[in-house]
Amino acid sequence: MHTLTVNLGDRSYPIHIGQGLLASPSLLAPHIHGRQVLVVSNETVAPLYLEHVIALLADYDVDTVILPDGEQYKNLETLNTIYTALLEHRFNRGCTLAAVGGGVVGDITGFAAASYQRGVAFLQIPTTLLAQVDSSVGGKTGVNHPLGKNMIGAFHQPGCVLIDTDTLDTLDDRQLSAGLAEVVKYGLIHDADFFVWLEQNIEALKARDKQALSHAIARSCAIKAEVVAGDERESGARALLNLGHTFGHAIETGTGYGNWLHGEAVSAGMVMAADLSARHGWLSRQDVERTAALLRLAGLPVTPPAEMSERRFLDLMAVDKKSLDSGLRLILLRAIGTAEVTADFRPELLRATLNAAS
Ligand SMILES: NC(=O)c1ccc[n+]([C@@H]2O[C@H](COP(=O)([O-])OP(=O)(O)OC[C@H]3O[C@@H](n4cnc5c(N)ncnc54)[C@H](O)[C@@H]3O)[C@@H](O)[C@H]2O)c1
Ligand SMILES: [Zn+2]
């Protein structure tokens, strides 16, 4: 088992990563406040893992809420069903919420915990690769509004993140690849050696080799933890975690939510960011090719769908939340392993990237 710490002063917390951790009650116990625990999962994950989690919590008064499965349910109405369960079962301020599932369950449950009685404890038990390397760490919680994704939310750090890599056994290949996009992102923004390790181990990761997956998850979480510890509320460096995401969000919205998975859209978006970096003379063409080659081997798309014209990209990018109050800011690469947030890119080169991609 690997254990990492997210260093945030008195809100610091551990991330435990390993096989079979859902059979290890001693890891959660120190982070459970009071006796009341509400376990939140969804209709897909609950039949697979809820029983294990309930067994972990044998010493507590446990209730459960099972949400419908899907990004389209990450909304205020679903959130309200969690509040209703908490109130019906008379949960007090000393209670703990536990999220068991992917990023959707984690984000909604985290926001319920951030807001119920002005904030109660919560635990993340992520079961998708994306949630294990990204959404369960860092304390961003929230739900979607019909007018924008993740627009209603709060920062609320979990007390513990428990990552049992065995849960990945039941994840389908497409979801696994989508998670790998975020793993590659960490190499690109922060760690050239990790990028090289990924090039050497991508086949093992695709084949779900547990040791390779554990290493990739631990390295990803360590980088995310470091970035978050340095900039919890995203006033600076945390924005680097959005590499490829401005293009990616445009693809997700432009193709209709759910057609492209988030990680797939981010994959194509990162290649576009690399291409734009190369057009500025920041990154070599060879490194753009390496990036695309690795993502392709990870089973991911590296170009946006044909229907995404330059015009469509620009319209959608203008409404991306990162650009609401200022000019468009993009994350570009200075090299593999080094990224920068900048509003100082050349618009004609951005148009060239958008045209080359479409
Ligand atoms: N909070 C953050 O910092 C942050 C970061 C990145 C993404 N997100 C959010 O995360 C969400 C995406 O997360 P996701 O990719 O995990 O999607 P998801 O939660 O929709 O999970 C993907 C699918 O896998 C299923 N699933 C989950 N675990 C499984 C398992 N072990 N075996 C089989 N099936 C399983 C789910 O039921 C779902 O159908 C988005 O809403 C995004 O906004 C948040
Ligand atoms: Zn992402």
Image (spheres, rainbow, N blue to C red):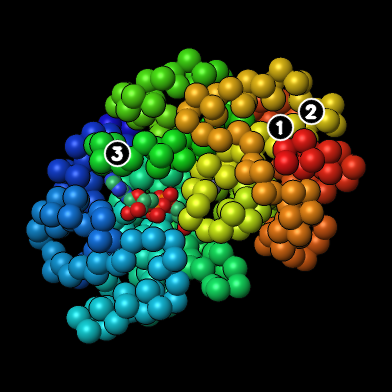
The residue identified by callout 1 is: 274
In whole angstroms, how far apart are the C-alphas of marks 2 and 1?
6 Å
Q: Position of residue 297 (x, y in %)?
A: 50, 24
Left or right of 30, for residue 203: right
Q: Quadrant for residue 40, please give it.
A: bottom left
The residue identified by callout 2 is: 278
Q: Amino acid at mark 2?
A: Ala
Q: Amino acid at mark 3?
A: Leu
Q: Position of residue 139 (x, y in %)?
A: 47, 57
CB-based contact (under 8 Å), mark 2 and mark 1: yes
Rendered position, 224 above or below 290: below
Left or right of 210, for residue 221: right
Left or right of 328, for residue 107: left
| Label 3 Cα neighbours within 10 Å, binned few <14 / some 14-19 / many ≥20 | many
Q: Quadrant for residue 302, please give it.
A: top right
In whole angstroms, how far apart are the C-alphas of marks 1 and 3?
29 Å
Q: Does residue 242 appear in the picture of this structure?
A: no
Rendered position, 259 above or below 164: below
Mark identifier at residue 190: none
CB-based contact (under 8 Å), mark 1 and mark 3: no
Q: Is mark 3 within 8 Å of ligand 1?
A: yes
N-terminal of the pair, mark 1 or mark 3, is 3
The residue positioned 59% from the left and 54% from the top of the image is 255
The residue positioned 56% from the left and 58% from the top of the image is 256
The residue positioned 66% from the left and 34% from the top of the image is 271
Q: Quadrant for residue 104, please give it.
A: bottom left
Q: Which residue extends farthest front? A: 307
The residue identified by callout 3 is: 168
In whole angstroms, how far apart are the C-alphas of marks 2 and 3?
35 Å
Rendered position, 21 above or below 71: above
| Label 1 Cα neighbours within 10 Å, binned few <14 / some 14-19 / many ≥20 | many
